[in-house]
Every structure is written in structure tokens, then in C-alpha cells.
Amino acid sequence: MARPLGPVRLKRTSPGTIAVGIVLVIVILYLLVSPSAPDFSAARKATAALHPLSPPTSPFRKSSAVGGKAGPPPVTRYNLNNVTITNDPVGNRENVLVLTPMARFYQEYWDNLLKLSYPHELITLGFILPKTKEGNAATVELQKQIAKIQKHGLEKERFKSIIILRQDFDPPIPSQDESERHKMANQKARRAAMAKARNSLLFTTLGPDTSWVLWLDADIIETPPTLIQDLASHSKPLTVPNCFQRFYNAEKKAMDERPYDFNNWQDSPTAQELASKMGKDDILLEGYADMATYRALMAYMYEAGADIHTEVPLDGVGGTALLVKAEVHRDGAMFPAFPFYHLIETEGFAKMAKRLGWQATGLPNYKVYHYNE
Amino acid sequence: MRADIPMGTREETHSRFLLTALVSLLLFGLFVWPGDSGSFSWLGSGSEDFQLETVRYYDLSNVQGTAKGWEREERILICVPLRDAEVHMPMFFGHLLNLTYPHHLIDLAFLVSDSKDNTLAVLERELTAIQASTDPSKHFGEISIIEKDFGQKVNQDVESRHGFAAQASRRKLMAQARNWLLSAALRPYHSWVYWRDVDVETAPTTILEDLMRHNKDVIVPNVWRPLPDWLGGEQPYDLNSWAESETALALADTLDEDAVIVEGYAEYATWRPHLAYLRDPYGDPDMEMEIDGVGGVSILAKAKVFRYGVHFPAFSFEKHAETEAFGKMSRRMGFSVVGLPHYTIWHLYEPSVDDIKHMEVANSGQQMEQERLAREKEEKEKAMKEQKMKESFGDATGQWEKDKNEIQNLAMQENKKAEEQPAAGQQGGPADGPANAAPKEEKKEDTQ
């Protein structure tokens, strides 16, 4: 490494090299400073909270330019009588909270999310990730993508606010492999943990100005860009599209699709009968051969070419994609982490909503797609 | 690289060097400028004087709640449901300002619903004054005043509203109000949530620390109320904190899905041990009792209880609603639910429906005269208090406005010859109170 001719070379080229070095330093400094350079318009700033202690659905002022110590948070009034929930959410400037429990980061999920045509300045994103190795990796990837949009994206691409939460409990099964995840014996513990994650995310982010909550799982990779508007146009308390999965059909030797989410169902006498004989802590599960419930599954109600806005009433819902009026959650409808009428998590949620007077609606012909691992 | 640099004259190189050095120094200076980041905000945004932060990150394992939250900077959310509570405001703010828990760690959330008095304006004025105080130790954290009207869904008939039958729907409405408040105000940085009614008359200023020290998921003190002498001096107030009994469980099994068991009514003899009746004025205030139902006057809970989904069921959950069902659901999720039988706070006394009935009976006899004399004497002694009691019990656990008016009319008739108005204007029993007094008295004797 040591070159005897070094000093000579250095002497000859030093001004240029230093200049290059300085240019590089400037470039680096510029890059460090510039992420905050393309800032928000005055219209967006007007909706910002004055203090970091504020509803997480609002962006907040980083700090006042006057400098010095910020005062105590202001007294803020919120009139929830004025938070509308209508079938024209864009026209009425209704805030949507998109909530995603995330164990793995899928680029396809993120890309699809960015394509949603609902005005991004009305969308708050909320994520909750477990504190596992996998969760850490997903968090890093998520933060990277968020920084890209929120700091360097065009203003219309940037979301109103984003909340990342880390779970305060360990998932019962470390593996997220599909086969392991669906084992019946693991379902109760897994779904109880998922319910706790959903509730933790929901009740710390809902805030005072959310009109709609869109539950969107991290492995939903394809939806129509008008998903929110389409589901909201039905103006139902709970609205669920039909979740499918694309796969390579070896028989047809072509890409094909199949129903994926079996938690959207209409109850059956058989299921009721099964439930009545169960112990207090037992749960009914859908999609398992050794527990035939004969419920009518929305997954099988899809009709090619039929009206995408066809509605069916549902008694159980899945959470892969689910639009909920915020008032349903505000009334207390949550995802039971314990057997509730022998149902748990999203299916228990539909039941609890029903107990509060809110009926779930399914859209069998409106499809969204799940990742295929 | 070297080949890319055009080699100019010595002077050119020097001036370029100087220029770039200056620019970089300037930028560097801006970048590392001591103090807040606001100093370079003009760099990017030009006319605006602040920048937006749109991303928040929280690790929920940092907000578990521990026995000494005040030492660990744990934030606590105080939730106060309100309805026509203007008269209680001075008393309530007195308690609030005297809380010894560090104020900057306390976030306040109020839900004002269906109020016809000046609650909202008074609340905002008082809170703004606190935040503007020159003493920073008085300042609280985030303060939210939330307005939401739920409307009257209750049957207007007097009997059904006060009777046992109306209890279920009343409790469900109160539950709804609590859930709206919590879900709008809970943040990812809260370790604790404290529910407090406005009409608590006496409570230790250290109540947050006192309850927190027990490090339980859900904990309530005993709630009593003072009474006029003609009613015995004092009385258990909150009968919603109880431990489950076999009788009650058996009873629950016989009831239909939407039924709500309410304590203190003859219709439901549950024989449950009530926290209230176990009070010993000289007992150890730290003594704990495991309970299943909880009353809502003063509840301290770890925020994670609410984060995991426990709430105040506005439907019949295990044959209960609101705070009692909150206790039940907490237990269902494996949380510890504890009451302190000998640590007592005092609820404001307001005549209940039974007190009025008592007066009604007395009306026919000369007994009324004596009682009125005793009452007048007390009224003089407690002039201030009486003033407050002009209004009905006013928070979300209180009566409906129409309720109040109806009973006011009722009482006015009874007291029509009474020369002073206050006695007629102070009606409306507590949520859990209206028809409770009689069973309370009986049971009190039983347990003594």
C-alpha cells in the first residue's frame, strides 16, 4: 500500500483532490439536509397538530422556528358530531385509517397501497410489527419505503400521517410459514395474538377525526386502486371484499386463481349446533375438514361477470381486507382475543359488532388478492 | 478521478477552493448549529416557519405500566365523561390541580355529551387557564375536549327510567360514551388510564400513586358518600365493585342474552360480596380484594388492558354492561382486577329517588316537619354544597336531562310548601344509585 512516490503525486494533485473532496462533502451535507427540504403545502400544514402530544392521525409541527422551549400542549376541542361517515368520502373529505398488522414486508403490498386513488392527504397508515427477528427486518424495510414517500415523494403521494408500533408481546408461533400457520391446533393461540395486535393498533391510533378504518393485511398484494371509494360507496358498517389468491395451476399449465379467505361466512344450523355443545373456551374454525360447519362461505359465492357491487349479509368476517365505519369501533366493537360466542379475532369482531347493532356485508364479486408463498 | 478535474491556473484553483470551502463551511455550520432543528427549517420551506413530522414510531413494550410510574416517566390518560356538569367543575378542578402525580405526565380527555348547561365553556376556560399558568409544574400534557351527543334513546316514562327495567339501556348508553372517549384519546405512549367521575367530593391527592403502587391491571378504591343525619351519616355508594357469587352465576344462566344484571335491585338477589360493605374505617388501606365487577367512579387501569381490547361493553356481556362488564371482560382476558376495601373516596351526596320516596311517605305525617327542620339545618351548614346540588348529577354516569326535570317536578310537588328552592332542585340519583338506597341499607345491616 505504501507507495514511495506518494508524496510526489500528492503534491502535484492536491488542489484538485481537495476540491473533489469538498464537493463530495457538500453533496453529502446536501443529502443530509435535503430530505426535509421538499416540504408540505400550507393547506396541509393547516391541519397539523401544534404539539407532538396529539392524535397520531395528525402530522405535527416539528418545532417552532422561534426556537426556545415549546410551551405545554394547547387545549384542543374535537367535535365528533361533525365527523361524517358517508357514501361519498372523497367529496366529504373523510379521513381513512388504514391498519396493517405486519410480520413480513411485501413490496407488492406497498406498491399496491401507493396506487390507492383515495386522496393520500386523507389517509393515515398504521402498522404494528412483532419484535422478532423477522419483525425487525420488516420494520427496517417498511421505514425505508416510508422515508422514500414521505420525504422524497411528490406531495400528493405522501400520506397524512404514519404510525409504526412494535408489539409488546411475542407471537406464539415464531414461524410464519403457511403450513405451520394454518395448523388447527395453533389457530387459537395465533389468532388470539393477532386479535391483541389488531386491538393494540386500533385503539392507540383511531383518534378523534377518523371516519373509516380499512383493515388491510400485509399480504394483500392486489386490489383495485379505488378500493376505499368502492367499499365505502355501500355505506355499510362493515364491508368485506372477496379475498382470492393467484397461483400456477399445474394441471392447466397456466396462472389461475382460487378463493383464499374462508372467514367470511353466513352462519349455519350445524355450526350453531356444534357451538352449543362446546366448552366455554372452545372455538369454531372455518376451513378445516375435521370441523365441518356447513356455513355458507363467501369465498364460494363468486360469480364471474356478475355485478361487483352485489351484497350478501355475513355473520363472520375475515380481516384480509375489511372496511369498517369508525363508529363501530368507537362503540367498542373489537377483535376478541378470547372465545366470544366460540368465535375469535375477526370472526368474533363481526359477532360483537352484531351485538352492538352493526351488520356485516360481503361483496362476493369484488376481488382482492392475497400473496402466494 | 484526477483525470476528470480540469487543471486550471493556480489562481483559479485557489479561488475555487476558497469558494467551495466557504459554502461547505456555511452548510456545515447550519447543519450542526446548536439547538433545535428549527434553525434550518427556512432552508427548505421558505415562507412557512415550521416543518411537518408525519411519521411516529412507538415501542409498546416501553409502556407496560409499573408500580412507580412517576419515577419512570410513565404517561397516564385521565378520562372524564361529562354531562351537564357545570356545577361540579370548581370542585373537580380543585382535585385535578392538587394531584401529586407529575402533571406533565398526565394527559386529560373529556367527553361532553348531550349537555344543555355551560359545561363545555367552563371546561375550556379552566383548562386554558391552567395551561397558561406561569407555573410550569401546573401544566398538563395533551388536553382533549371531545363533544359527542348520543341522543335520547331511553324510554321517557318516569317509572321505566328509574325502575329496574331502564337500567340496562342506561348502562349501555353510558358504556358507549366511555368507549367513544377512550378510543378517541388513547395514544401509543400511554402506560396508564384513569377514569374519574366529576362528582367525587373527597379523595386523596396521591390517589394515582396510591393505586398505581399496587401494580395491578385494574384497581378501584372503595366509594362511599356522606349522608344527612336523618339518613344515617354515611353510606356505601358504589355497589358495582363486587366479587362473583355462585348464586349470581346461576342466575345469569337463567337470563336471556340481552339481560343485564344490576346490583342493588330486589329483582336480582345476587348475594355477591360487595367491596363497599367490606369497608372498615380503621382497616389497612393497602388491603386488596379480588373482584369481578368494577364501579366507574375511580378506576386505574394499565393502558394495555384497553389496548388488548377490553372496553365497556355497550351490550350484555356475561349478563352485565358498562363498568361491571369491563371488570368481567378484564378477568376473561386474564387481567388482575382488584378493589381496596379500606381505601375510601367520597362521592358527593345527592338525594336519590328513594330519598324522595322517603320524603313522600313522610309528607303525610308530622315526621315531615321534623325532617324538614333537620334538612334546613343541614342546608345552612352546607350552603355551598347545596348550590352545587341544584343541578342533577351530571356526568355520563348520571341521569338524562329529562330525567332530572321529571324528578324535579316530582320533588317540587312534594316540597311545594317548602320555602327554599334548593331542596327541590337537586334531584337525580347516581347511575347506580336511584333505586339502590333501600337494598343498600338492608345489606349494610346484614354485613355489620
Image (tube, coloured by chain):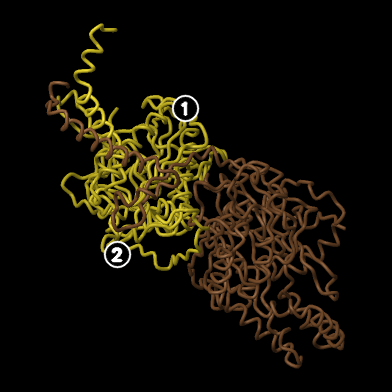
Asked whether the viewer can see residue B31, the reply is yes
**Where residue B67 sits: x, y (%)?**
68, 42
Which residue lies at the image location 63% right of the left edge and 44% below the top edge?
A: B331
> Which residue bears the numbered disc 1?
A173
Which residue lies at the image location 18% right of the left edge and 44% below the top edge?
A: A304
Rendering colour (chain A) = yellow
Q: Nearer the viewer, residue B367 or A270?
A: B367
**Disc 1 on helix, strand or loop?**
loop
**Disc 2 on helix, strand or loop?**
loop
Q: Chain of mark 2?
A: A
Could you tell me the amino acid type at mark 1? Answer: Ile
**Where residue B124 sits: x, y (%)?**
54, 70
The chain drawn in brown is B
Q: Residue A31 is drawn in which quadrant?
A: top left
Question: How many residues crowd around disc 2 within 10 Å: few (fewer than 14), some, or many (20 or more)?
Answer: few
Q: Please say if A77 is above or below A134.
A: below
Task: Give the mark count.
Answer: 2
Q: Quadrant of the N terminus of chain B?
A: top left
> Which residue bears the numbered disc 2?
A92
Left or right: B347 in relation to A78: right
